[in-house]
Amino acid sequence: MESPRSLRHRLRLLALAILSVLYQSAPWRLLSLVALWDSVLHLAFLFRGLRPVTLDLGHSCVHLWVPAPARGHPRKPALVLVHGFGGNSRWQWEGQIGPLSRSFDLYIPDLVFFGNSRSASRDRSLGYQASCIAEAMQRLGVARYSVVGISYGGFVAFRMAEGPAAGAVERVAILTAGICLTPEQLRDFAAKEERDVCELLLPQNAEDLMNLLRRSKYRHPKWIPAFLLQDFIEVMYRNQRMERSELLKKLLEKGIDLDPIPVLNQDTLILWGDKDDIFPLPLAHQLHRHLGKKSRLEVLKDAGHALQLEKPDQVNLLIEQFLKGVSDINL
């Protein structure tokens, strides 16, 4: 007898196949399913009590989601969620906003050159990204907060905690970010790819995007219609592509761009998937050793690089309990 999970998988494949056939016929080709889902995510964020704002910092405009005013309700501890390179903040944190918003006031920025955040500056450094978010939080009047960052966002979160927001950041959670990699090691990592890293992380065709999904998720989808992959590229990767490519090149050139890499004063949670194919697991242990006693490492079984998408329940529980100061966590 076929298991329910297997049946659901077959039904999803059938639905995708039907969509693929329908999409080939006009006028359906005029409809962007990815843009439609992006609108659904926008509504989901609104439903969770968040509202979008754009702050003009002079040198840049930072778009972020902030708690909507709630009369008669006390403010909760503030938490900043910093996304990585895949898409924008809505796509990366949709699995976290529901559970985490029950305990925290969420602030979810689009990094500069992602989503609706813009800048005329030529600065492509991690330090600049960190200073933009720190300045945005200051403009919003949030004096104390914790910060969670995944992948590239983990690098930014680290820079916030040691630099422009050192006095404001209470606790830090870093997800799958190879912070201790030296520029030389990063270049070696890039060389092993045998192709331009920008082509991997900023795909331009359906095949490249499917490859990125396989690399990012341990249990990745076996098949996605090419039209849907291309649609995602058009919506998520076309705008500000050159600037994002420059961000990647700066990261590969400088790494975390701190010498020596400081030990954070804040308690730090490190989350990693044991099947990460972007930043392998030994890098988690390296960061844990570097940060010492004020850090804790949690390794999620059967999870890849995008562990907040693959294991949202575990990630949410670990983050919530860590920020609340709970030391023993049973998953």
Image: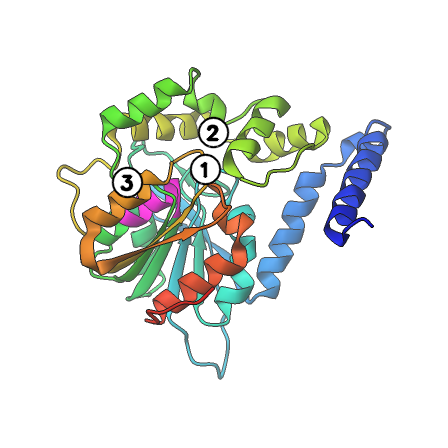
Looking at the rendered structure, the kind of residue marked 1 is Phe
Compare residues 321 and 23 and report the one nearer the observer. 321
For the residue pair 193 and 111, the one nearer the viewer reads as: 193
Residues at marks 3 and 2, CA–CA distance in whole angstroms = 18 Å
| Residue 154 is covered by the magenta coloring | yes
Q: Earlier in the sequence, mark 1 or mark 2?
A: 1
Q: In the rendered image, which residue does mark 1 sit on?
A: 85
Q: Which residues are magenta?
A: 150-158
Marking on residue 272? none
Residue under numbered circle 3: 179
- Which residue is the site of mark 2? 201
What kind of residue is marked 2? Leu
Estimate the x, y position of residue 58 in percent, counting from the top left. Answer: 33, 45
Q: Nearer the viewer, mark 3 or mark 2?
A: 3
Does residue 225 sit above or below 55 in this rendering? Answer: above
- Asked if the residue at tag 2 contacts the one at tag 1, i.e. Cβ–Cβ closer than 8 Å, the answer is yes
Label 3 crowd (10 A; few <14 / some 14-19 / many >=20): many
